[in-house]
């Protein structure tokens, strides 16, 4: 490899990229919203499109906005710009839009496609449960003909996610903006036939948290006090709630959020891999699993009268309730929002329930991400040995993985698919699940959450893929010129 590679990991709405690699694998150098804007037309037509001779619409590149130019236009006139997300799930793929976003990525990395000499490793969005060869061909065509890369490697999100978490076999749950997908990987081979998806994502969690905040009477009083009003103007409260939701999703991803665990799980079924063992730090899974229900106070055998015992029990219950109320009162965070920058707003326990749509369904009895995991693992395409082996590596990735307590909750919710007791030996059903995390020995990723695992894995792959002489893991411009887009067919991971 004569030039430094470009590593790009694309999600539905975000591109993470870097140019070059170091001995200490670095974090993304840039982050770019995976969208572009065109002028909005009041009559519903697309003002930024020309029509070619064959009737196919093409974007007028001179009017397309992307990156900072798009942000500036939206700040000045939000209604004057139509924002499009070409990498998000859609019936028809916007390949020209994808090219526009990737060209902006190159510009931010100071690379000119006209004289591009840098290999590209691209990880496409995981929102599609499969990555068919036809789609891989179109990626190859775009990269070689429009981005002018000399070498190109394409890796599925599930593969690089597991590699970044120090595993080659496991279950990868990717939580996207509107869709969550589950992929099964066995010995670095993606078992596409097992892939499942569910129409739940981060957008549903954001909307659900807003509904909870709107119904919170305590927060209602808090906001009226902060705004100095007795009643809200039309849409005023909704604006405040939206800003609170945005703050929580952007800033409160650590210990401020404790996603509730399922009730009735009374044993240690989750092992957290990749973290150094410390007695005074970390998440005590066993403690959390066994602390679902606090038993009521008990009165020991006594010679006191029934009336005295009843008084003692009432006093003990009152004390326990007071302690519980104090714990609830203490479980608050204080935030500020752009509309009320000088005021402090207190948010209570309602914030912990932001992941309910993922774990309990958008509606009562609705589909969940952990049930999607169960369907993928129970696929008839897996044999018994593989079905047990994949539980030894559960990866939760996507932007929602920023919330440190969410992967723990997902891992505990899958307990119906595990043995009820680890003391019961079985070759066909596991007794526990191992939750993967980024190993501590990656110094630049210390404390990082699963949302960065795909980028870490892609960086590791790039160090090997473009340096091996056989070219098994990439295709070159020469290959493309000789065989066309089908040259991608013989490249791992499909080989």
Image (cartoon, helix red, strand yellow):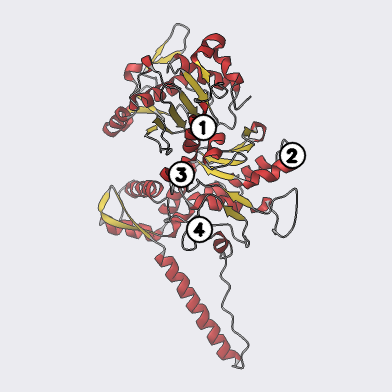
State the residue position of label 1.
Answer: 461
Above or below for 327 versus 3: below
Left or right placement of residue 490 versus residue 213 in this view: right
Label 4 environment density (alpha carbons within 10 Å; few <14, some 14–19, many ≥20):
some
Which badge, 1 or 3, is on the more N-terminal residue?
Answer: 3
Quadrant for the C terminus, please. Answer: top right
Q: Which disc, if any, is residue 442?
A: 3
State the residue position of label 2.
Answer: 383
Left or right placement of residue 355 versus residue 22 in this view: right
Report helix, strand or loop for mark 1: helix
Label 1 environment density (alpha carbons within 10 Å; few <14, some 14–19, many ≥20):
many
Which badge, 1 or 2, is on the more N-terminal residue?
Answer: 2
In front of the other: label 4 or label 1? Answer: 1
State the residue position of label 4.
Answer: 283
Disc 2 to disc 4, how far (Cα)? 33 Å
Whether residues under marks 3 and 4 lie with C-beta atoms below 8 angstroms apart, the answer is: no
Disc 4 to disc 1, how far (Cα)? 30 Å
Above or below for 269 versus 83: below
Disc 1 to disc 2, how far (Cα)? 28 Å
Q: Nearer the viewer, residue 307 or 454?
A: 454
In front of the other: label 1 or label 2? Answer: 1
Which badge, 4 or 1, is on the more N-terminal residue?
Answer: 4
Whether residues under marks 4 and 1 lie with C-beta atoms below 8 angstroms apart, the answer is: no
Measured from the top left, where is residue 445 in percent x and y? 43, 44
């Amino acid at each position: 490899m004569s030039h430094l590679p470009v590593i790009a990991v694309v999600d539905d709405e975000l591109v993470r990229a870097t140019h070059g690699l170091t001995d200490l694998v670095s974090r993304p150098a840039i982050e770019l919203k995976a969208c572009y804007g065109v002028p909005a037309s009041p009559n519903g037509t697309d003002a930024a499109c020309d029509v070619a001779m064959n009737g196919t619409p093409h974007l007028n590149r001179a009017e397309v906005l992307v990156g900072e130019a798009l942000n500036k236009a939206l700040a000045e006139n939000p209604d004057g710009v139509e924002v499009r997300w070409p990498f998000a799930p859609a019936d028809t793929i916007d390949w020209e839009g994808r090219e526009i976003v990737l060209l902006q990525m190159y510009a931010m990395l100071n690379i000119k496609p006209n004289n591009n000499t840098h290999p590209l490793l691209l990880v496409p969005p995981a929102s599609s449960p499969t990555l068919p060869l036809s789609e891989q061909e179109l990626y190859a065509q775009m990269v070689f003909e429009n981005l002018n890369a000399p070498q190109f490697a394409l890796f599925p999100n599930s593969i690089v996610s597991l590699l970044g978490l120090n595993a080659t076999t496991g279950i990868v749950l990717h939580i996207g903006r509107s869709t969550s997908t589950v992929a099964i990987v066995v010995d670095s081979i993606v078992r596409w036939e097992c892939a499942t998806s569910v129409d739940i994502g981060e957008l549903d969690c954001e909307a659900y948290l807003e509904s909870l905040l709107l119904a919170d009477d305590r927060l209602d009083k808090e906001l009226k006090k902060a705004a100095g009003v007795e009643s809200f103007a039309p849409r005023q409260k909704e604006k405040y709630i939206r800003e609170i939701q945005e703050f929580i999703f952007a800033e409160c991803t650590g210990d401020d959020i404790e996603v509730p665990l399922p009730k009735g799980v009374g044993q240690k079924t989750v092992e957290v891999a990749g973290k150094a063992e410390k007695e005074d730090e970390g998440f005590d899974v066993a403690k959390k699993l066994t602390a679902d229900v606090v038993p009521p106070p008990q009165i020991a055998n006594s010679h006191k009268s029934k009336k005295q015992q009843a008084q003692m029990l009432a006093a003990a219950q009152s004390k326990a309730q007071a302690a519980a109320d104090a714990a609830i009162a203490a479980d608050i965070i204080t935030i500020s929002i752009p509309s009320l920058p000088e005021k402090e707003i207190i948010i209570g326990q309602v914030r912990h329930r932001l992941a309910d749509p993922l774990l309990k369904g958008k509606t009562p009895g609705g589909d969940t991400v952990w049930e999607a995991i169960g369907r993928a693992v129970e696929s008839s395409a897996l044999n018994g040995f593989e079905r047990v082996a994949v539980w030894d590596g559960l990866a939760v990735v996507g932007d929602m993985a920023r919330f440190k307590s969410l992967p723990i909750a997902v891992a505990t919710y899958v307990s119906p698919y595990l043995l009820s007791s680890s003391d019961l030996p079985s070759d066909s059903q596991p007794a526990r699940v191992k939750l993967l995390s980024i190993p501590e020995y990656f110094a630049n990723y210390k404390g990082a959450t699963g949302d960065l695992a795909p980028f870490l894995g892609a960086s590791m792959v790039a160090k090997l893929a473009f340096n091996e002489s056989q070219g098994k893991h990439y295709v070159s411009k020469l290959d493309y010129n000789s065989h066309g887009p089908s040259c991608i067919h013989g490249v791992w991971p499909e080989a």
